[in-house]
Image: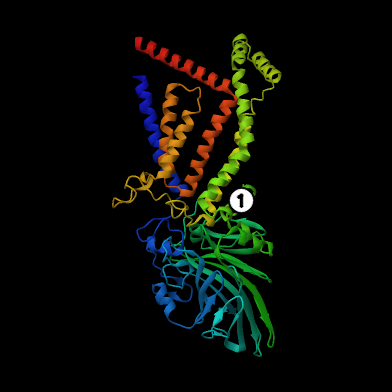
Amino acid sequence: MNNQRNLLLAVVLSALLLLGWDAAVGYLYPAPPESAAVEGLADTPGEMAAVTGADSGALEPGTGVVAPVDVETALAGGNRVRIDAPRVAGSIDLATGTVDDIVLKDYRESTAEDSDFVRLFSPEGTPGQNFAQFGFLANGERAEGGAWQADGAVLSPETPVTLRKRGENGLVYTVRLSIDDEYMITAEQRVDNTGEGAAVVQPFALINRTSRTATPSTWIAHSGPVGVFDDAASYDWDYDDVAEEGTVTPEGRAAWLGFTDSYWLSALVPGGGAADTAFRSLGNDDFRADVIYDPTTLAGGRALERETRLFVGAKESVVLDQYQDAGISQFGLAISWGWFWFIEKPLLWLLRNLFELVGNFGVAIILLTVIVRAFVFPIAQRGFASMAAMKAIQPDMKKIQERYKDDKVKAQQEIQKLFKDQGVNPLAGCLPMLLQIPIFFALYKVLILAVEMRHREFLYIKDLSAPDPATILNLFGLLPFDPPGFLSIGVLAVMLGFTMWLTFKLNPSAMDPIQQQIFNIMPWVLMFVMAPFAAGLLLYWNTSNILTLAQQKYLYSKHPGMRAMIEKEREEKARAHEKAKAEAAKG
């Protein structure tokens, strides 16, 4: 009866763990929404707009409410300068001078062959509203003067474009735009005072975006306002914080600031000259990051120039680091690496090079896992040898404890002497495990943060950054329904449960029968827990489990006595358990 009660308790606790873990993961690591309209996970502004039904009523101070409009309609009319760079395409609206049309040529919205390019910038009033603007304040008011005039039709790395318009009181405004081969646009802003009277002028730059299309922010991957201030990266605020505060003004000089999603970044990089930088809530889930240069009194016949750069693109570690090396402070920290960046970045470098070598990202993940496990194998071997040595002297330890059971201090002294005589360090078994934790956590985080894994194929999987699509409960898509949440069990999740179960079975431990029952159930509970994670992560975990099995077989072959001692100890515990049951039944 007690055994059945304990088994029932184990099952109930496992179910609570399953449900509680699913709820905790949903809170701390919310998965991007899924929809029939979007293949896989929504990780771009366009996909987020499709699944959330985002509808912009963009309230910009001084302009009122902009009527909702779709992207195609917004881009169809008006006078525009086309953007055509190696990795970026789009256009600039000359009516307002806004950069409000940016797509990435190297990334698609989904894995479908006819999928559109990933769209990062969309005009004001569209569901995915996100745009940048370079402008001027004159005597405290936004400079007017009608539409901008352009001296060219296409902005490309070879053909910069200059925008010009004439304002009031003889002020002439000029913005010279250039773009590089990656994701950076440079704006050289100039104002000439051709009038007789002085004017107080302030160049500014801003990024305006809606939070309705933002990817979820998690404890492991920040999404929202981001920047570097006084050479320190800040991930302190999310959209809710800015909405509550109204205006957030970070302390320190801004090296750059903007908004980040899981894989994408739009950021302003101020140039020379003192400036105020802030994140602002505009209402209706619209936000702004801005750089407003300090006011300058400009006498007649004088000119003022400021330079601001705009990054809008994918968070590719190599590209971000190149910009950092070129002088943008801590730009590589647009990716929220965390404490173990010094491990994560080399792992990502190795993963990229393996992918270039073998041409398949899934195979690269497998090879990376093999290399990492080979690297930590000597540490694991040392820890296993230490555990074997501890097991070997356990009978002597028990004898000392029995001999000095009334003198704890003496018993401890004798045990320490035994450790010294046998050359055993009781902490040596734990230390190797502790050393491996940051390495495996770093590998896990690399697979979470790396845009390089997005839309990469492996066997039947079209996107390693999304969950395993081969869901067993709907017969791999043959049945017309999608299992909810943790019931979406894919092939990789089943393999994960099986390999973990094998690991426990092949790793004898001195547990009583109840503990053994719990460990028999645990792998299948974890199968449900891990099922919603990215397929690339499950591929890594499965590979790691298989290597663990091989490692166990090898290490036990090198220490056959340890396995025998553990089996003997387990049998003794089982006999003691049965004896206790029999005595309880008699009572």
Q: At x 49% / y 56%, what residue is drawn?
A: 454
Q: Amino acid at mark 1?
A: Leu
Quarter of the picture holding the N terminus: top left
- Judged left or right of residue 135, residue 196 is right
Query: Does residue 61 appear anywhere in the picture?
Result: yes
Query: Does residue 220 appear anywhere in the picture?
Result: no
- Judged left or right of residue 100, residue 397 is right
- Judged left or right of residue 481, residue 72 is right
Residue neighbourhood size for the residue with mark 1, other residues' Cα within 10 Å, grouped as few (<14), some (14–19), many (≥20): some
Q: At x 51% / y 28%, what residue is drawn?
A: 507
Please name whichever residue, 556 or 244, is drawn nearer the observer in this view of the structure.
Answer: 556
Rendered view: 551 above or below 282: above
Looking at the rendered structure, the secondary structure element under dot 1 is: helix
Residue closest to the far bottom: 196
Please name whichever residue, 49 or 444, is drawn nearer the observer in this view of the structure.
Answer: 444
Point out residue 380 in the picture as x, y percentages from the top left corner. 61, 33
Please name whichever residue, 29 or 358, is drawn nearer the observer in this view of the structure.
Answer: 358
Q: Which residue is mark 1?
A: 350
Quarter of the picture holding the C terminus: top left
